[in-house]
Amino acid sequence: MEEVEENEAPLLSNLKILRLKHLPGLSCIWELPTQHVRLESLVELTIQHCPRLKSLFSLSLAQSLVLLEVLDIGYCDELKQIVTELEGDEGEISAINSHTSLCFPKLTELYISTCDGLEYIFPTSLASHGLQGLTLDIRGCHKLKQVFRVANDSMLQYQQSLKLLSSFSMSDCPLLTDSVVHLEAEKACIEGVRLSAFKNSFKTSKQLRLSIIKNHNMVPEANEDGLNGVTSLKLWGCKDLECLVDTTATATKNGPTSAFTHLETLFIAKMPRLEALCKGQPPQGFLKNLKHLGIVDCCKLKSLFSPSLIQSLVLLEQLEIRCCDELKTLFADPEIDGEIESKTSSLPLRLPKLNTLYIRACAKLEYVVPITLAQGLPALEWLWVSECDALKQVFGMPNEQNEVHHHSSLLLPSLQDLELDWLRNLTSFVPKNYIVKAPSLKRMKAKGCSKVMNLPIQQANNQLELTLEELAFIMEDIDSEDVNLSDIVNTQLIQKSPDFEYITLGNFEQLFLLQGGYIMSSLERMDLHNVITLQDIWKGPIHVETNLRELTVHYCNNLTYIFPETLIPYLPQLSILNIASCENLKQISGNDDILPSSSSSQGPQLEMKMVFPQLQKIELENLSKIESFSPVGYHLEFPYLHSLNIKKCSKMITIFSADYFTLTVHAKTDQASQLNDTSPSREDIIWKRRRPTLLPQYKEKKKTEEISPFK
């Protein structure tokens, strides 16, 4: 470096950002002497792929870094020191009060990766000064032993020193420990070491993320104090970890008095040896503040919660379990679990705050929640269970001999969303003689549950107002010989509660069996796919005000009609109608066995009018036997129809026309227009409101007889 005149400003004093990358010959950034160089304006320094570089700063140069905020160092294989302590001008070193001057006061982010020669990061002089609030990220430094260099016994004054970092992340640094200067960080992420190497650190950390750590348990092996300050713990790929806490005699004589007392979020993934959250009796306050729990891919886990542990989960809100192949029970029964009876375990089981329960791909799980605990789920809003091949019941009876012989009910007052997918051995939602009361249910979906025989849901509150908004049944393709075609509606329960609307799922013949009374239904969307034994969607006297907006019915081959005629006046909100591939369907609006047939060969004496006031889209496709939209003699009006698509409905005799002035679509089924075997097949109809002339002009017939209003 060229000599600088005495009155000139220090070199590089205005430099704010310096980036050095891919300089294979660079061995030194600053040629001595450096007293004329001051980096007092430097904010960001990046050094990447400089394999011959051995150090970055002299002491005097480091002293000038009062504004440095970001330091990023990577792939410098021979780097041994960031700040040179023992090399250079001895006079320069002696002139610096290193205990007070060298502190990097603005440094907030330090990233170091793949520097195989680095043994420590900061010199001793920083062990008790500065760096509060620092984000420190270290990766792939195989010789790194210390964050702060402590060279000899004279440095023991720094022992027990705590560095209050904002965030600490470390991976693939097998020799790194906190043997002298202990670390504390709001967030800590550690990968690929034994957590016991940091046994005296992270006692006040709030968020802890551990990957591939080599301990068998976290308390007491990795930390004897119980990690009570941690509020969020995420564990991934810790193949040796068997439990979070071990209180058995083999682990510790006395055991921790408390553990994870403030933990709110716990996520565990890819832990092949995890057997339990706690081995032995749970310590005081264990998981008492837990709100969110997720467990994924823990193939040895057989049971999750013991009865005594359930009692502490009073704040649990969300539970997600996925891909735990050996899991048989989420909530162990006291008798089956062999737990010693105590005041705690004998209390009623309750999860008063649980609102979300998601279970997927747990092959040996036979039921989700024991029926005794199900009575204690007042806040459960969202329940989704899928791909559990052994599951027989959602809410089950642990001991089959305890089968209920009298009628009982399960109240789920907050349940809004229920989804059951690909549960091939599911036979019932609840044990025999139980009925589910779900007054808040808004969405219900079942897909691929071919063996379900009973799902009675009493979906009404005291005001008889049904809140269900979306309903979808999507059944898998199954051989007809394996299907029980019996009517599965529980007639005894219906007789007990005649004014309620029942939803029955499975190999059923009726979907809604209405036994009288005036009911308001909030069901907005309903999808029925491949429900092969369904004969009636609505059955019974129709006195129900509906909010149905979308109806999709595909591959329901036993249906002969969609709506009973008497239901049409109660569909004021219906806007989308999509019917396809129902091979025995003959009419959209048809007759049930409640009223005498009005579609006899003579037809009605008066023309009956049906109005669909909000229907905007009609799609009818691949309905080989459909003959009409409505019985003969009915006049249909669609004042707001925007789209009409009728394809592959060759026997349809209903004539559609459009009023070019009001844009109202009309449909009539006249006996005279019936097709015979020699008549040509009807052509497809594709009509859009913006092109009304694609349908014939509607011409009102002048009749002397009265037209009966059928609103």
Image (spheres, helix red, strand yellow):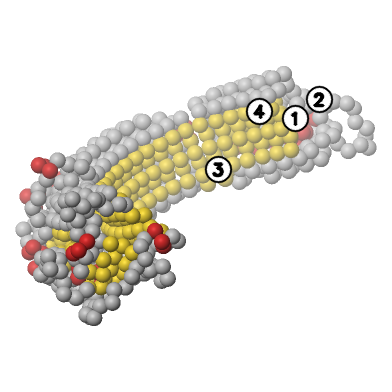
Lateral position of residue 308 relative to residue 598, left or right:
right
Mark with earlier residue (1, 3): 1
Q: Residue at x 18, y 50 (%)?
A: 678
Image coordinates of residue 115 in percent, x first then y, are 60, 25
Contact? badges 2 and 1 (CB < 8 Å)? yes
User: Closer to us: mark 2 or mark 3?
Assistant: 3
What secondary structure is marked by label 2? loop
Q: Which mark is residue 167?
A: 3
Mark with earlier residue (2, 3): 2
Mark with earlier residue (4, 2): 2
What secondary structure is marked by label 3? strand
Which quadrant does the C terminus fall into? bottom left
User: Closer to us: mark 1 or mark 3?
Assistant: 3
Of residues 305 and 403, the one nearer the viewer is 403
Q: Residue at x 36, y 35 (%)?
A: 270
Lateral position of residue 227 relative to residue 447, left or right:
right
* C-alpha span from label 4 to label 2: 22 Å
Image coordinates of residue 114 in percent, x first then y, are 58, 26
Contact? badges 4 and 2 (CB < 8 Å)? no
Q: Which residue is mark 2?
A: 32
User: Closer to us: mark 4 or mark 1?
Assistant: 4
Q: Which mark is residue 48?
A: 4
Mark 2 crowdedness (10 Å alpha carbons): few <14, some 14-19, many ≥20 = few
Mark 4 crowdedness (10 Å alpha carbons): few <14, some 14-19, many ≥20 = some
Q: Residue at x 29, y 46 (%)?
A: 359
* C-alpha span from label 2 to label 1: 9 Å
